[in-house]
């Protein structure tokens, strides 16, 4: 008796699931007329980052556009920065209610959004490819997708450099004006001195968390410097399982082993609060360190001393989304927002580097007035982006898992972990 | 009735504390469901003459259940069915109007999931979590609720203090716990040389127990409330006559309180298990993404990682289905162990 | 029972309460301390992780973290939105949850087992599994984006609360209802006049249980509402928290202050509601 009732229940639950599945299979369809939208004009919606400085810039940009184009008004909203913005965009793509432009599209998410059919190739506009080439130059090639098209406009970068705390360096008996941070081994020695002298709790405190993007702020800048600008994947193959990659890994492994870096996540900003003497960050950080830390910065060191070092770009781009009805207007707004004037305003208001060729010459007056930013402008021309390949998030997660296992927590040898990760990443990159 | 049942309970005082659920049930707590059952099952006088009722004795119950059923079918069945469907196909979400091939792949996604060592580790992790969290939650919340029920002063203060962690957003409480449990945090300062190395949240052995402790702490207030409400149902006379018969407080606790709140215990056990199985925020925020080295990752966290961050909802859906089935099995086992007959019929 | 023995038992209970009191005080310390730490942290100019940081220090106290929040988000509007969102969920849960909970516990009808199984199953499904299909359905099929209803719908009837109702209704003797039915009372009348007054603690429990979900939820309302004037407090605070880290003078203090603001109304509501536990006299009225 009991058995029969429970099996009836299981069957009815299954029936509900099947019913739902049937409904689900019938869904889909519909959709707009792609080619008509490409030339249509009218009001559009955009999202920009909710970072205080970017909001200010965004509001001014929108106001300027709206004043000149009463028939093609832009309606702007903030998008949450950080962990949840990609899932917000991803869900909106599926529901077909993305805005026309998102001024904070992470390059790592572009292959996925493109695969979902959420993005418009900017080459579809007659002047699209040319405009991007004229503005950004050769650096734009890093942002091309597998089909050779550009689904994102390279907008601004935050080239990562090594910040150091001059006061803590002086306290440890190091020369704050000329710190010995030219090579990876110098960095290790400096780190030991900093911690052993008691000047700083930790020499450097990159986040040890397992998020896929954390490797952009420990491994990747050093790897870029070490290899003079090699991406994580080249021609569909993982590159990091080589001597240069393992050098970076063993340097970090030493930092963790000797407790010069922390295995724990820090709440807040360890560098701003004087808990660590060095930090990896881009020019956006200048504004927040200004009143708190007496800081200096050096390029990311490689194995050997070098003049023109490379680093990770930490770029944020603009995507034009396929649910947009008035794509011609969106393209015009995009060009307006990345014009020389607006880029200049972005630079002066946020301190982030517009991705333009000849940046230092274009805004010479600004860099003369703000010498702190000058090195970043120079560095911005030598940046490495995350590779634009399918499964990019999963690839970075695979790398991060291997990194945490071998470098941070030393549960596996670096050789084995990198080999295993490289094999898996080769498979992932080969998938369609 | 209460007097007689109370003496019935106290007579067992000298005996070993009851182990099985049936053994310790005082008549007052066990009687109602049992009585109801006999009423229903017995082919008694009214039932014999009763005409055939295809919808049951109170078909109005269908109407009462209707809004809830409509809610489940209208809001939750479709996404659930969709998820089950997705788990058997090669699938990713696309913009409306985009046509892609979504071939049926059988159980391929399930094989991918179950052969992934990271996934297997995460199931082991929540098993560890539950082994610590569920008994601790049930035990502590019952003891504290019982104590709370007995005092007269500062009742409000205590209730509020237990409830506060439960209402506070995880983002902030986690921040505080990180401060307390970090290498140089307050807990380690107090422990001195006894402080574990590596510290709690970056120690492969201690990370999951610390997470379990945190969740117990965070949720306990709510479970205390459940027990507190259930304790109101135990008639005062039971305790009074038990103390007349010379039962000490532990005997009273075992023989009157524990059986008296059995249906609440079923609820608490089940809810604590479900909370544990759906563990997400803590590995996401407290241990920096399932750290150290996956020692605190959970199936739901991996679902989030695979399905939403990495764009593989097919694999994530398969993982979700496995998880739901697993919880179902555990819940059924628990219902047999803790609940006896009082959970479901 | 004689008067002396009754007095003895009362004395005994009082003795017991000393032990209980110590236990509770210990528990309360463990429970309140992190919260206290949070409150102190939200008032600090700069974070202090040492043992000394647990005590207020006059030089390091500031209300600035709170002033900052008030300056950057519309607290009142957020509170109203949170109230509508949470209130809608609670209302639907209590009204429909009581109906189905009562039906599951004290009525016999065909399909009861199925409804019960559904209720159990629904609780076991992780929200992350349903997130995107649910979002697509609510926004695309039901057209409820930027709408309070769209926010409320997935949470509308809390299945755990339904379970709680059922569990409490089951504890009531069925003879009570049989008798009322024989007297010819309608089911709705029985529910309203007999059953509900007896399960007041269950209603309070369900409200407190249901309250937490929508009140602290930020991902769902954020996905559904792109219009900032509709966003609940948790969403604006999460926004505030996520972008403040780079710019606030004390990011950690800012986060803690945000959490305190979010928690305060919830704690106030609880203090208001918890009296309901005392005023019920369930034991005697049912068993007597």
Image (spheres, coloured by chain):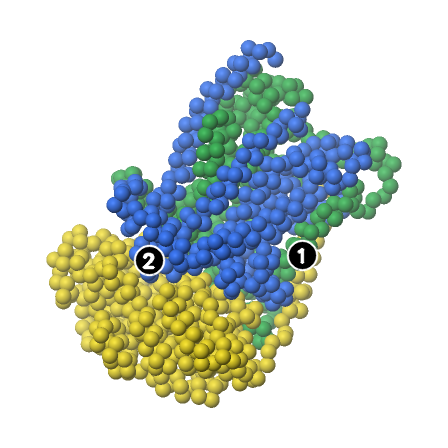
Residue C281 is left or right of residue A316, and the answer is: right
Pinpoint residue B301: horizontal percent, then vertical percent: 47, 56
Report which residue position mark 1 lands on.
Answer: B73
How packed is label 1: few (under 14 Cα within 10 Å), some, or many (20 or more)?
A: some
For image coordinates 68% across by 45% down, the residue present is C100
Is residue A105 visible to the viewer in this orientation of the structure? no
| Quarter of the picture holding the N terminus of chain A | top right
How packed is label 2: few (under 14 Cα within 10 Å), some, or many (20 or more)?
A: some
Residue A355 is left or right of residue A297, and the answer is: right
For image coordinates 58% across by 73% down, the residue present is B96
In front of the other: C166 or C75: C75
Mark number for residue B150? none
Residue A316 falls in image quadrant? bottom left
In front of the other: B66 or A305: B66
**Numbered disc in front, either 2 or 1:** 2
Pinpoint residue A262: horizontal percent, then vertical percent: 28, 54
Mark number for residue C248? 2
Count the marks: 2
Host chain of mark 2: C
Q: Chain B: what color?
A: green
In front of the other: A16 or A335: A335
Q: Is residue B299 above or below residue C185?
A: below
Q: Secondary structure at mark 2?
A: loop
Q: Chain C: what color?
A: blue
Pinpoint residue B172: horizontal percent, then vertical percent: 40, 50
Is residue B263 visible to the viewer in this orientation of the structure? yes
For image coordinates 63% across by 41% down, the residue present is C165
């Amino acid at each position: 008796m009991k058995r029969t009732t429970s099996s009836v229940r299981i069957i009815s639950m299954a029936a509900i699931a099947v019913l739902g599945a049937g409904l689900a299979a019938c869904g889909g369809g519909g959709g707009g007329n792609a080619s008509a939208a490409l030339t249509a004009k009218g009001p559009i919606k955009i999202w920009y980052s909710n970072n205080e400085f970017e909001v200010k810039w965004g509001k001014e940009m929108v106001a300027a556009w709206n004043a000149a184009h009463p028939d093609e008004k832009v309606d702007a909203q903030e998008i949450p920065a950080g962990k949840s913005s990609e899932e917000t965009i991803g869900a909106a793509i599926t529901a077909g209610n993305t805005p026309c432009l998102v001024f904070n599209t992470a390059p790592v998410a572009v292959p996925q959004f493109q695969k979902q059919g959420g993005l418009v190739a900017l080459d579809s506009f007659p002047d699209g490819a040319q405009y991007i080439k004229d503005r950004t130059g050769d650096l734009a090639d890093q942002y091309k997708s597998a089909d050779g098209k550009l689904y994102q406009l390279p907008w601004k970068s935050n080239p990562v450099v090594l910040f150091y705390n001059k006061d803590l360096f002086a306290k440890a008996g190091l020369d704050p004006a000329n710190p010995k941070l030219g090579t990876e081994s110098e960095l290790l020695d400096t780190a030991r001195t900093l911690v052993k002298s008691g000047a700083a709790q930790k020499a450097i405190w990159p986040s040890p968390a397992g998020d896929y993007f954390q490797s952009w702020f420990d491994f990747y800048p050093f790897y870029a410097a070490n290899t003079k600008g090699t991406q994580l994947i080249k021609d569909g193959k993982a590159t990091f399982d080589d001597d240069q990659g393992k050098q970076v890994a063993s340097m970090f492994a030493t930092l963790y082993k000797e407790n010069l870096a922390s295995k724990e996540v820090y709440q807040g900003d360890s560098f701003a609060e004087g808990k660590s003497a060095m930090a990896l960050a881009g020019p956006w950080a200048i504004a927040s360190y200004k009143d708190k830390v007496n800081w200096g910065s050096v390029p990311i060191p490689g194995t050997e001393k070098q003049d023109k070092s490379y680093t990770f770009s930490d770029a944020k781009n603009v995507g034009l989304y396929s649910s947009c009805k008035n794509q011609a207007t969106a393209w015009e707004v995009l060009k307006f927002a990345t014009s020389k004037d607006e880029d200049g305003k972005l630079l002066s208001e946020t301190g982030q580097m517009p991705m333009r060729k000849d940046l230092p010459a274009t805004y010479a007056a600004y860099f003369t007035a703000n010498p702190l930013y000058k090195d970043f402008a120079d560095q911005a021309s030598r940046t490495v982006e995350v590779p634009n390949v399918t499964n990019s998030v999963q690839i970075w997660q695979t790398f991060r898992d291997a990194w945490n296992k071998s470098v941070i927590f030393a549960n596996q040898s670096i050789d084995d972990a990198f080999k295993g990760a490289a094999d898996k990443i080769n498979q992932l990159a080969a998938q369609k | 009735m209460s007097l007689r049942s109370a003496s019935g309970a106290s007579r067992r005082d000298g005996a070993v504390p009851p182990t099985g659920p049936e053994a310790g049930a005082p008549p007052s707590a066990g009687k109602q469901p049992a009585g109801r059952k006999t009423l229903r099952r017995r082919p008694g006088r009214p039932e014999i003459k009763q005409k055939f009722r295809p919808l049951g004795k109170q078909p109005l119950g269908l109407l009462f259940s209707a809004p809830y059923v409509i809610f489940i079918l209208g809001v939750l069945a479709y996404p659930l069915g969709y998820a089950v469907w997705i788990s058997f196909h090669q699938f990713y979400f696309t913009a409306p109007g985009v046509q892609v091939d979504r071939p049926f792949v059988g159980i391929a996604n399930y094989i991918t999931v179950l052969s992934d060592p990271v996934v297997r580790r995460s199931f082991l992790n929540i098993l560890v979590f539950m082994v610590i969290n569920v008994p601790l939650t049930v035990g502590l919340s019952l003891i504290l609720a019982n104590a709370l029920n007995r005092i007269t002063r500062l009742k409000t203060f205590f209730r509020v203090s237990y409830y506060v962690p439960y209402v506070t957003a995880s983002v902030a409480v986690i921040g505080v716990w990180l401060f307390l449990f970090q290498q140089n945090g307050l807990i380690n300062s107090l422990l001195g040389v006894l402080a574990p190395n590596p510290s709690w949240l970056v120690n492969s052995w201690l990370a999951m127990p610390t997470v379990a402790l945190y969740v117990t702490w965070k949720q306990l207030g709510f479970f205390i409330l459940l027990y507190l409400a259930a304790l109101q149902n135990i008639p005062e006379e039971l305790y009074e006559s038990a103390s007349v018969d010379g039962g000490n407080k532990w005997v009273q606790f075992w023989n009157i309180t524990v059986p008296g709140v059995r249906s609440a215990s079923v609820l608490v056990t089940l809810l604590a298990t479900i909370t544990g199985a759906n563990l997400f925020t803590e590995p996401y925020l407290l241990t920096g993404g399932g750290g150290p080295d996956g020692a605190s990752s959970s199936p739901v966290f991996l679902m989030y990682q695979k399905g939403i961050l990495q764009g593989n909802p097919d694999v994530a859906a398969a993982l979700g289905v496995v998880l739901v089935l697993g919880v179902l099995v555990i819940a059924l086992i628990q219902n047999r162990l803790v609940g006896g007959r009082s959970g479901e019929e | 029972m004689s008067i002396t023995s009754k007095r003895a038992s009362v004395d005994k209970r009082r003795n017991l309460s000393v032990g209980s009191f110590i236990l509770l005080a210990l528990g309360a310390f463990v429970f309140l301390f992190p919260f206290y730490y949070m409150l102190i942290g939200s008032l600090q100019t700069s974070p202090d992780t040492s043992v000394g940081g647990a005590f207020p220090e006059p030089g390091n106290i500031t209300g600035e973290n709170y002033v900052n929040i008030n300056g950057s988000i519309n607290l009142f509007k957020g509170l109203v939105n949170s109230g509508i969102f949470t209130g809608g969920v609670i209302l639907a849960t209590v009204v429909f949850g009581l109906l189905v909970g009562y039906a599951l516990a004290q009525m016999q009808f065909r399909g009861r087992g199925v409804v019960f199984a559904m209720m159990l199953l629904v609780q076991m499904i992780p929200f992350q599994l349903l997130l995107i299909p649910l979002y697509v359905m609510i926004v695309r099929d039901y057209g409820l984006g930027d709408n309070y209803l769209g926010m409320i719908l997935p949470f509308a009837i809390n299945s755990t609360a339904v379970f709680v109702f059922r569990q409490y209704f089951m504890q009531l003797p069925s003879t009570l209802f049989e008798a009322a039915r024989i007297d010819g009372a309608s089911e709705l009348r029985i529910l309203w006049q007999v059953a509900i007054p007896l399960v007041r603690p269950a209603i309070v429990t369900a409200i407190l249980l249901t309250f937490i979900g929508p009140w602290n939820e930020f991902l769902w309302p954020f996905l559904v509402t792109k219009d900032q004037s509709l966003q609940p407090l948790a969403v604006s605070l999460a926004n505030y928290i996520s972008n403040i880290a780079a710019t606030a003078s004390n990011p950690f203090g800012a986060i803690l202050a945000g959490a305190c603001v979010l928690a305060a109304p919830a704690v106030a509501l609880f203090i208001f509601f918890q009296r309901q536990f005392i005023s019920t006299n369930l034991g005697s009225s049912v068993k007597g």
